[in-house]
Amino acid sequence: MTGRGVGEQVVDHVDLLGALPGFDSLDIATKRQLSEKFERKSADAGEVLITQGEPSPGLFVLLDGHVRVTQRSQSGSRDLNLLGPGAIFGEMSFVRDGGVAGASVVADSPVVTAVLNPDDFAAALEAHPDLAHAIADDSLFRYRANLLAHVFHNIDATGRRHLADAIEAIDVDRGQIIVRQGEEGKRAYVLTEGTAEVVLESPTGNRLLATLQPGSLIGEASLLTDSPRDASVVMTSPGRVLALSRSDLLDAAGNQGKVSAELVSLLRMRWRPVQKPGIEVTERVTPEGDKIVVLKDPARNAYYRMASDGAFIWDHLDGQTTLRDISMGYLQEYGAFAPERVARAVHDLVTEGFALTANIDVDLTEDDTPKGAGAIAVRALGALAWTKGVTGVDGLFGALYRAFRILFTRLGVVLLALVAIEGVLVSIVRGPRSGDFIADAGGTIVLLGLIPANAIGAIVHEAAHGMTVKHFGRKVNRAGIGWYLITPVAFVDTSDMWLEDRHKRALVSAAGPFANLVLAGMAAIGAATVTSPLMSAILWQFVLASYYLALINLNPLLEFDGYYILSDFLDRPNLRDNSLSWIGNDLLGALRSRKLKGHGVHLVYGAFALLYIGLVAFFMLVIYRLVLQEIVAGWLPEAVASGLAWFFALGVASIAALGTWAQMKGLNAPRH
């Protein structure tokens, strides 16, 4: 038969055979004879076309759909490849394995195939020896390429072809040592057949570290460095390995100076990280029932927060369990195979100083820092938020708390709230006339009082944060100054409150704006009662400055107190970063698959945050340009002043835009 494809499409098996390896050398009459023997077959998704260990049903040509090639071993089943239209499979059983399938092939979707039965295929191979050799060579190449695709995901098809051509197959006997502990590493090996053991040799005796199954990578550290082998690998059964050198791998990766990030990931899979001694662990449960774990290093006053899956990884850092083993445990616990998630979590724990593991020569690993626009965006993100703090301030805030402890009693809080409320009422009634008092007292000169008013308001604000931390029995690690969105800020480090519940954390965040409201109330009451126009004008400066500080800090779209109150109320750490990153990386995919459930908070908060950033950038552009132009015009020509004002304003707006883009891409700003 000439065969028919899917729907109305006609498939010419003569042309199809001519495109297959080896068959292109056959004459047209032979191709025509063979093509008549193909049978068109359909299969549903999940149907097994070839079963490992059983005789192959013949030579398959995939006309439509996709099939998955899997191989079963003692360690479980693993995918070797996913094939699409035009691929052939089943031939390896005849040219290499005596007619018995060495892997299973399962329909990954509804498929249509053209099948040449075993007898006809065997007869064709016997009649045409060159055809058998060509198919055998191509099958061996594809077998190696598929295996390498399973091991080296980040190397493209061209690179894997280079490796498959350069790789050397070596038959090994039971008891043969593949790599010997202490020897300098020159090559790495992929175990394709048989089993092996990883043995650590020591004067007190040998210790079994792991048992390797087909598909395992042996001695991969030699692909990164020529350092001595840290263990021996001994075959426990006859088998075969594929040997590859570092130079061949570098050629395949297309990078002579650095190795592929995949190699670093593979090496990390052999790490046996251990928890750093002395780390304090605190667990809490969110209203949704999710577990959050906070790590504290008392020696450094450093903290690290993790969700439940991060806590699972942390619990397995015992110095004996490899990241590969943790990844398999993660699969059983959470139903997801996520070695990248495991490796990244451990990498972050090591980087932040909470876990210890073997070092990699950083000169030999791929530099994964952002390049080009990404690097500029990360620097912009760092410029948007910068702080400089001092330590040793806990005693100061402790003394302040003891001095003003009465304010933290229930009666004290009620009285302060009444002052704040009365201040709001006075400001509503008398506030509209405050401009007259300022004008009568000296106008613009008196407005300079806003500078000390803001400074005092900031000091009171941060003191309230620090004293509230002490009220809950926690430690204030640092205090300092900095800027956020090119705005000067002061801060108190309240990270120790991560160990408390969300209600106490929210109260610490609210203490600062509440103090500003109380300060505004006291100033408003004073301004309404004094008779001196000058004193009244000064007090109204404190009212304006205090309300401004309270409102700006309660804005949940900036990473000030209102944001942390909202984050604690929702019990979603890193709400802003996660929301912007989700919008930047996952929103389009979620819209295509219509899977927005569970991401409503990310979508709403992220959208409002982006809108606010856009408005801020616009007003910064307008205000900076107008104000700077007016100032600079006093010393420079108007055209030059206008140009400098535009340049600075556009620069500030661009920094804000680049920093936001970095957050949306999940890039990290440098630490200060």
Image (cartoon, grey):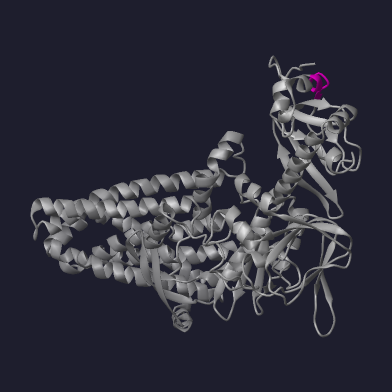
- In the rendered view, does 478 fall on the left or right side of 273? left
Magenta segment includes 158? no
Residue displayed at 73% across by 41% down: 138
**Relative to the observer, which residue lies in front, 105 or 607?**
105
Quarter location, residue 526? bottom left
Report the quarter where the C terminus lies: bottom left
Name above or below for residue 362 compared with residue 336: below
**Could you tell whether 10 is left or right of 114 in the image?**
left
Q: Where is residue 158 in the image (x, y as percent from the top left)?
A: 60, 46
* Number of on-image labels: 0
Which residue is more in the foreground, 186 or 521? 186
Task: Locate residue 88, reporting x and y percent.
Answer: 75, 33
Visible in this render: residue 251? Answer: yes
Task: Work out whether residue 6 or residue 629 is closer to the camera in this orientation and state it.
Answer: 6
Q: Is residue 529 visible?
A: no
Classify residue 23 by image quadrant.
Answer: top right
- Extent of the magenta region: 33-42
Residue 186 screen position, x and y as percent: 67, 68
- Picture coordinates of residue 578, whole percent (x, y): 53, 53
- Answer above or below: position of 432 versus 139: below
In this orientation, which residue lies closer to the viewer: 503 or 18? 18
Side of 475 relative to 161 (left or right): left
Picture quadrant where residue 157 is located: top right
Q: From this viewpoint, which residue is outermost toward the top? A: 8
Say which residue appears at 24% left-offset and 68% top-offset.
451
The quarter of the picture where the N terminus appears is top right
> Which residue is at a point 31% across and 71% down the rendered structure image?
456
